[in-house]
Image: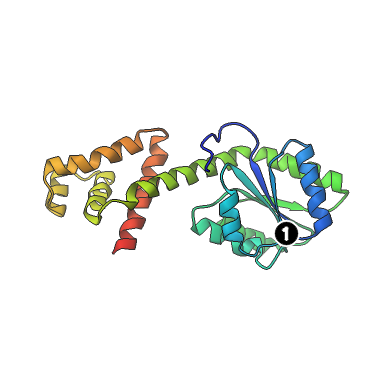
């Protein structure tokens, strides 16, 4: 069940750490500092399905870089391709700068946290970073929700109706839409009306962008 109330409460923490003792220490330390909702992953097998199941509210990925079999550099872009892009903090004692730079282009990279010092000091630094990117997590969740709703809106519509919506969203005059798709003006307005209602529910600019992207994607799938 997707949680539409993304304006309150701490985000869920999706914690990837394959060293059992460290994983439990981090999880307990994070929870003791207020981030109660922590989902622990000891490996990245079937990571896409696992994160899809856990991503039901705003979340932040916290991952050791060398967790396996897939590293964050590999699995985070896979998730992004599915529209799942929570902010991600990477932690490790040793990662090459060029690798981290690559992540900035391939996922919702939120920073690097070097491991070191006492466990308590590390977890305190980690939670400080988590607190700083809560808004980023909520924004990513809102984008995911709006994209999901747009996908549901377009999935039952015919290619011709999708083309009407696409042209409407690109501000074509209704006369040009009539000529292009072969529908009457009244039929076009019947198609456009629900699209307008969808956009105007809340967050209109973001809903507009999400719907246009969903229409383009669906038309490509059907072509």
Q: Relative to 142, is 18 on the left or the right?
A: right
Q: Relative to 151, is 72 on the left or the right?
A: right
Circle 1: element type: loop
Q: Relative to 180, is 57 on the left or the right?
A: right
Quarter holding the C terminus is bottom left
- Please name the residue shown 57% across and 42% down the image: 57
Q: Which residue is mark 1?
A: 42
| In the foreground, 142 or 21 | 21
Rendered image quadrant of residue 221: bottom left
User: Is 14 drawn above or below residue 198 in the view shown?
Assistant: below
Q: Locate residue 6, reporting x and y percent.
A: 55, 36
Q: Using the rendered image of the protein, determine whether residue 108 is visible from the camera's viewpoint.
A: no
Q: Locate residue 164, reporting x and y percent.
A: 22, 49
- Please name the residue shown 38% across and 35% down the image: 204
Badge 1: residue crowd in 10 Å (few <14, some 14–19, many ≥20): some
Residue placed farthest to the front in the image? Answer: 1
Q: Locate residue 117, reporting x and y percent.
A: 87, 50
Q: How many marks?
A: 1
Q: Locate residue 201, reporting x and y percent.
A: 38, 33
| In the foreground, 208 or 51 | 51
| In the foreground, 214 or 170 | 214
Q: Using the rendered image of the protein, determine whether residue 62 is visible from the camera's viewpoint.
A: yes
- Please name the residue shown 30% across and 58% down the image: 219
Q: Relative to 83, is 39 on the left or the right?
A: right
- Please name the residue shown 47% across and 43% down the image: 145
User: Is 2 drawn above or below residue 98 in the view shown?
Assistant: above
């Amino acid at each position: 069940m997707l949680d539409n109330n993304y304006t309150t409460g701490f985000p869920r923490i999706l914690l990837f750490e394959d060293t059992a003792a460290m994983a439990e220490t981090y999880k307990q330390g994070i929870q003791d500092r207020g981030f109660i909702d922590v989902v622990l992953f000891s490996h990245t097998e079937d990571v896409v399905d696992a994160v899809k199941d856990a991503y039901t509210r705003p979340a932040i990925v916290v991952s050791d870089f060398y967790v396996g079999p897939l590293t964050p550099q590999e699995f985070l872009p896979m998730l992004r391709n599915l529209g799942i892009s929570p902010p991600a903090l990477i932690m490790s004692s040793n990662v090459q700068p060029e690798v981290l730079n690559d992540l900035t282009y391939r996922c919702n990279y939120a920073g690097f946290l070097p491991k070191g010092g006492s466990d308590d000091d590390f977890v305190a630094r980690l939670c400080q970073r988590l607190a700083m990117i809560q808004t980023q997590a909520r924004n990513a969740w809102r984008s995911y929700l709006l994209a999901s709703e747009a996908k549901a809106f377009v999935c039952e519509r015919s290619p011709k109706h999708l083309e009407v919506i696409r042209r409407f969203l690109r501000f074509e005059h209704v006369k040009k839409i009539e000529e292009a798709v072969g529908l009457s003006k009244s039929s076009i307005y019947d198609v456009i009306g629900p699209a307008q209602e969808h956009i105007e529910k809340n967050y209109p600019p973001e809903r507009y962008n999400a719907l246009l992207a969903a229409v383009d994607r669906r038309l490509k799938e059907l072509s």
